[in-house]
């Protein structure tokens, strides 16, 4: 088992005015995030509106993404409830040499640990040469991974279950598995997680905090004094007052109006909340004009 480590953005998807996926600009945004400091990018996570984007558009993007200069630095999310469609998307991505996948259990239905073991078992039985990062996000899918469930999955599939993105925050402090990647889903948990032995973060707000988060990460490993962590956490707190996807699109649309395009049932922030977000960020001297990405 090879551990994945570093700062990963859960990248935004960029849409045209007709709300179709703009493949070229979505890939360029992901590449810009890596240039800005991210070790890699998760494509088609919840931040990328994956649950709202068609399978055909995902396949088109993955085909072109395979030609990216950073093609080894992407984690591919699925965002699909259907087991069959999840397996088919992973199979297609594997033919294009993508090997790392962020997969959440299906939403809506009620189920327990044994059902989750069965779900991932069926994926891995079909695709034995994939590497899966479990996506622990109870607010989105209704299920929260237990420590015991993760341990059982790793024991059963040590070569395939290689990490977890913990956005429910019930695992990153207590889960201890050798050479297993643990990524809290917030910049607020980055430094604490690193001290506990976590691998880094995968977060939505790294779409705008990539360079700050990378500095915290690098300073930790270089034993430097932490000078960026407080600002990083406060920026995250400012975004957390709103729907993250709406807030990120609203913020980035000040630099490029294409970010105003967002799929229903999502929307941009109201003028009142937009004003609040920009005021909070201005107090932190966090200005979009100074960002390297976009």
Image (cartoon, rainbow, N blue to C red):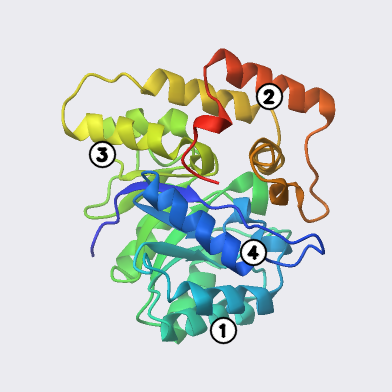
Up-down relation of residue 101 to residue 281 (above or below): below
Choose between 95 and 133: the one closer to the eye.
95
Vertical order, 168 against 234 (above or below): below
Q: Using a 10 Å C-alpha cutoff, classify the residue at mark 3 as few (fewer than 14 neighbours), some (14 to 19) or many (20 or more).
A: some
Q: Nearer the viewer, mark 2 or mark 3?
A: 2
Binning the other alpha carbons within 10 Å of mark 2 as few (below 14), some (14 to 19) or many (20 upward) gives many
Circle nearer the N terminus (4, 1): 1
Q: Which residue is mark 3?
A: 197
Mark 2, residue position: 277
63 is higher (above) or lower (below) than 146: below
Q: Left or right: where does residue 273 sit relative to residue 187?
A: right
Q: Is residue 214 left or right of residue 277?
A: left
Cβ atoms at labels 3 and 4 below 8 Å apart: no
Residue 64 locus on image (x, y percent): 51, 76
**What x and y, as percent, mark residue 276?**
72, 20
Sequence-first disc among 2 and 3: 3
- Mark 1 or mark 2: which is in front? 2
The Cα–Cα distance between marks 3 and 4, rounded to whole angstroms, is 29 Å
Kindly check if marks 1 and 2 are in contact, taking CB atoms under 8 A apart as contact: no
Which sits earlier in the primary sequence, circle 2 or circle 4? 4
- Mark 2 vs mark 4, foreground winner is 2
Question: Is the residue 186 above or below the residue 45 in the image?
Answer: above
x and y percent of residue 149 in the render? 44, 56
- The numbered mark at residue 88 is 1
Q: CA distance from mark 1 to mark 3?
A: 34 Å
């Amino acid at each position: 088992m090879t551990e994945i480590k570093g700062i990963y953005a859960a990248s935004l998807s960029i849409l045209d005015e007709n709300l179709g996926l703009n493949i070229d600009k979505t890939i360029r945004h992901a590449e810009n995030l890596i240039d800005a400091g991210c070790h890699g990018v998760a494509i088609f996570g919840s931040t990328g509106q994956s649950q709202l984007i068609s399978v055909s558009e995902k396949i088109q993007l993955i085909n072109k993404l395979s030609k990216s200069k950073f093609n080894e630095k992407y984690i591919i999310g699925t965002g699909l409830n259907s087991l069959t469609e999840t397996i088919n998307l992973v199979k297609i991505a594997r033919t294009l040499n993508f090997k790392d996948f962020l997969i959440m259990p299906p939403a809506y239905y009620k189920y327990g640990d044994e059902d989750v073991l069965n779900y991932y078992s069926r994926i891995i039985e079909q695709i034995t040469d994939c590497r899966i990062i479990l996506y622990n996000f109870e607010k989105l899918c209704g299920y929260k991974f237990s420590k015991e469930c993760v341990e059982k999955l790793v024991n059963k599939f040590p070569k395939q279950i290689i990490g977890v993105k913990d956005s429910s925050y019930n695992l990153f402090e207590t889960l201890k598995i050798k050479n297993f990647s643990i990524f809290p889903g917030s910049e607020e948990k980055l430094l604490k997680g690193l001290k506990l032995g976590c691998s880094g973060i995968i977060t939505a707000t790294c779409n705008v905090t990539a360079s700050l988060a990378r500095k915290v990460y690098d300073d930790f490993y270089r034993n430097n004094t932490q000078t960026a962590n407080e600002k990083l956490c406060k920026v995250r707190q400012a975004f957390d007052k709103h729907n993250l996807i709406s807030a990120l699109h609203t913020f980035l649309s000040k630099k490029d109006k294409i970010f105003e395009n967002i799929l229903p049932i999502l929307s941009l922030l109201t003028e009142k909340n937009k004003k609040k977000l920009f005021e909070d960020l201005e107090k932190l001297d966090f200005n979009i004009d100074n960002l390297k990405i976009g």
